[in-house]
Image (cartoon, rainbow, N blue to C red):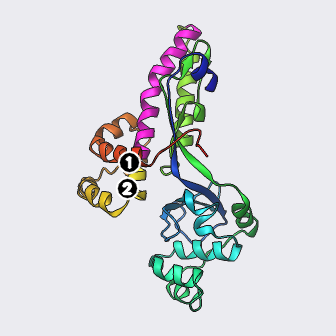
Amino acid sequence: RRSLVEKRGMKEEHYLAPSNWKALRLPPQDFDANSVKSLRHPFLKAGRVLPRYPDGYIILCFWDEKEGNNPGNIDTAEELKAMFTDAMQDTGPPTKRTVNKNWWFGNGNKDTEVAEKKRRDIVFDDDAVDLFLETRPGRSHYMKVDRFHDDSVALVGDSAHGMSTLLGQGCATGLKYTQELVEELSSDSKELTEALQSYSKRSVRGAHSITDLNLVAASVLLSGPILKVLMLPILLLQKMLGRTMLQQLQRVDIPYEKILRENWFLIPLSRLKWRRERVPFPAKG
């Protein structure tokens, strides 16, 4: 892709999100096997607990890039386990004031108020926890190109599109448009160039749509209170109608373009926030 952009005139729009992310593997837990649970903690901007095939779970968490390689600058396994255990409680996390007081200023026992809220024990894999602490955080890429082919070259997966991991659609998008490439190449009536042109035409709009839908997700989950208040009436109406964006994304029979069209009114607010926070790629400094 880089060669096509620099030497063949392919147009690229590429930015980084202003947050770090990591994933932590969890052993099987006492959760609903198909559940997707939100994480709530002052150290995190957003997070999810996702089912992992064939068993267990994955914690996917996001935090401000300025806070270092781990959420809240945590650097020990015990602190990380305590944070995630608290973040997965149904009663919600302690206030930021409580966390700061106990963890950073040494006033009182840092486990006292957290322990009072715990209602669920979380099983951790110690090797996975150590790996989480040692691994460099990732960055979410927002990336669009104007076409997925050039001459006899085709782009698929992350080379063709980049988006936030918040919706968990990156792999699904890559597989979907790889399938479309295979279908075009399998056609006996099309030459290679024609097949790649058709693949690009079929795929670009859908991939751009899911990239923009991730901006909506980031705005809803990672935004401040003002933007959330502005979006709340729209989101409540969608929920009453039974067609929220997340519900639609779970249905494989609904194209990304259709979901974007039905959520077009959320895009302007999302873009406004994104333009203010995005970081050019490659990041400077």
Q: Residue at x 53, y 7 (%)?
A: 189
Q: Label 2, on which residue?
A: 220
Local secondary structure at mark 2: helix
Q: Residue at x 59, y 86 (%)?
A: 110
Give the magenta part as a residue range: 191-215
- Would you call the spot at circle 2 few (<14 residues within 10 Å), some (14-19), or many (20 or more)? many
Q: Label 1, on which residue?
A: 216
Left or right: 225 in relation to 280: left
Left or right: 142 in relation to 104: left
Question: Chief secondary structure of the magenta span?
Answer: helix
Q: Residue at x 38, y 51 (%)?
A: 247
Q: Is residue 81 visible?
A: yes
Q: Does residue 257 belong to the magenta stretch?
A: no
Q: Position of residue 173 (x, y in %)?
A: 52, 37
Label 1 with label 2: CB-CB less than 8 Å = yes
Q: Which image quadrant is residue 73 in?
A: bottom right
Left or right: 210 in relation to 262: right
Left or right: 262 in relation to 17: left
